[in-house]
Image (spheres, rainbow, N blue to C red):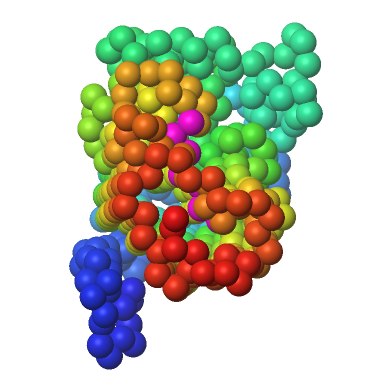
């Protein structure tokens, strides 16, 4: 538990008492001891036979029976999207791989989701649920999204990943969706999917509760790897995430409540963990924060930000506790990253880090950036306050602190204690911060007082 082993808690530990209360509420689902083996329903693990219907039949029979495990033996099982139902544990043990179709047509009809923080109807995530409870994907096997620079990823329109003139790209649909969000177009009219090139996520349950993702290796998603949406009581444990495609974020809980992410590893093409809560007017309209999140024992290699909040955070992010994490790669840009702007608005508050070990990152140990994308070009003023970092170390980075608020909306109440940052190449960038306090903080061996 977050405060295990403490004989006497100093005053600053009182905030971590809330982490203990969050952990007490988060209980992974338990399933009846019934197994439904997919091979009994016609699935063949030869890597080419389409197992979609067999898997759907096994899931349906499992949920009708009151729940249990849908079990894969060793082998490679080719499939289209999988729709999970209540009380089903999709068990993918070591030696088994689910290999998902690269054909976008397979992910139709469209389903309710968010895309970059805006509600819409779009391609189904590769594993999806809506309005269910007691769901799991477990085991030591693999979920392979099979996206690459010939399939899905070129829609991002990066010339270094398969795009060239004449290849479809997401830009027009992205702009249209953002305009719909800005003008409150009803969700039923925000229909995308075929012909619009907005890529789906891999694991994307929505409006569901009591969710467990445990033990599997997840990789090469069309877009975000793991992104529960509007879910509660979520446990993500011992998951290994690998994907270096565009927007291959590792784990992005979006407007979720009571989330535990523990003992996971990340090697990604974008943020490793990014807590989100909707984008711009659409996120503020829903006003559904991501809150009560505990992150512990995770390991980050490549990525943009390691432990990140934003940039889609307009509904707010609060009560986040991260501890005992290791972040180390010259290809990891920021260790602790907050990104927002004057279009996002929203608030980030009561964020606590402790016992964070950082080897090497390329840009900054801590970045709080109000100038992300649109910057000050908007009417909103984000509120970012009550951020605490304790017992963090770094061996190499360009900056220790790169913190830039707005003059009209400064970052407030940023506290650092018992931190040591070595081999820092540049002076801190600190703009429009009120209430920066430092206690026993050393940068390149010199005490830093926050002034």
Q: Nearer the viewer, residue 371 or 88?
A: 371
Q: Nearer the viewer, residue 70 or 268?
A: 268
Quarter of the rendering occupied by the N terminus? bottom left
Compared across the picture, whether 41 is left or right of 284 comes to right
Q: Residue at x 58, y 14 (%)?
A: 171
Q: Residue at x 44, y 55 (%)?
A: 451
Q: Residue at x 37, y 54 (%)?
A: 436
Q: Position of residue 225 (x, y in %)?
A: 54, 44
Q: Which residues are magenta?
A: 365-371
Residue 369 drawn in magenta? yes
Q: Position of residue 394 (x, y in %)?
A: 60, 66
Point out the residue furthest to the bottom here: 7
Which quadrant of the figure has residue 338? top left
Q: Is residue 357 above or below residue 146?
A: below
Q: Position of residue 199 (x, y in %)?
A: 55, 27
Compared across the picture, whether 446 is left or right of 88 comes to right
Residue 58 drawn in magenta? no
């Amino acid at each position: 538990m977050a405060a295990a082993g403490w004989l006497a808690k100093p005053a600053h530990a009182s905030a971590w008492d809330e982490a203990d209360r969050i952990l007490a509420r988060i209980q992974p689902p338990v399933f009846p001891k019934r197994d439904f083996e997919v091979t009994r329903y016609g699935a063949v693990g030869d890597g080419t036979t389409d197992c979609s219907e067999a898997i759907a039949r096994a899931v349906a029979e499992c949920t009708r029976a009151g729940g249990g495990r849908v079990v894969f033996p060793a082998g490679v099982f080719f499939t289209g999207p999988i729709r999970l139902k209540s009380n089903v544990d999709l068990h993918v043990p070591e030696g088994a791989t689910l290999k998902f179709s690269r054909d976008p047509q397979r992910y139709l009809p469209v389903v309710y989701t968010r895309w970059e923080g805006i509600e819409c109807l779009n391609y189904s995530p590769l594993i999806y649920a809506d309005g269910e409870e007691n769901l799991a994907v477990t085991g030591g096997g693999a979920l392979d999204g099979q996206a690459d620079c010939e399939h899905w990823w070129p829609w991002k329109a990066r010339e270094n990943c398969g795009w060239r003139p004449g290849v479809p790209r997401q830009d027009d649909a992205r702009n249209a969706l953002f305009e719909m969000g800005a003008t409150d177009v009803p969700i039923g009219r925000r229909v995308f999917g075929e012909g619009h090139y907005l890529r789906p996520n891999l694991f994307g349950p929505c409006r569901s509760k009591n969710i467990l993702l445990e033990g599997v290796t997840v990789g090469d998603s069309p877009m975000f790897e793991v992104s529960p949406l509007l879910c509660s009581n979520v446990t993500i444990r011992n998951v290994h995430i690998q994907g270096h495609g565009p927007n291959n974020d590792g784990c992005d809980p979006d407007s979720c409540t009571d989330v535990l992410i523990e003992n996971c590893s990340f090697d990604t093409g974008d943020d490793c963990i990014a807590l989100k809560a909707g984008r711009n007017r659409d996120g503020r309209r829903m006003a559904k924060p991501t809150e009560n999140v505990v992150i512990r024992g995770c390991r980050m290699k490549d990525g943009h930000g390691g432990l990140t909040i934003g940039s889609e955070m307009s509904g707010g992010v609060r009560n986040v506790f991260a501890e005992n994490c290791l972040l180390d790669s010259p290809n990891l840009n920021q260790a602790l990253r907050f990104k927002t702007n004057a279009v996002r608005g929203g608030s980030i508050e009561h964020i606590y880090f402790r016992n964070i070990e950082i080897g090497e990152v390329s840009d900054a140990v801590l970045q709080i950036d109000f100038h992300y994308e649109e910057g000050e070009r908007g009417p909103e003023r984000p509120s970012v306050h009550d951020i605490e970092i304790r017992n963090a170390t770094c061996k190499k980075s360009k900056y220790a602190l790169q913190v830039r608020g707005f003059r009209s909306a400064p970052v407030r109440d940023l506290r650092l204690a018992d931190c040591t940052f070595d081999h820092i190449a540049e002076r801190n960038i600190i703009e429009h911060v009120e209430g920066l306090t430092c206690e026993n903080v050393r940068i390149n061996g010199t005490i830093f007082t926050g002034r």
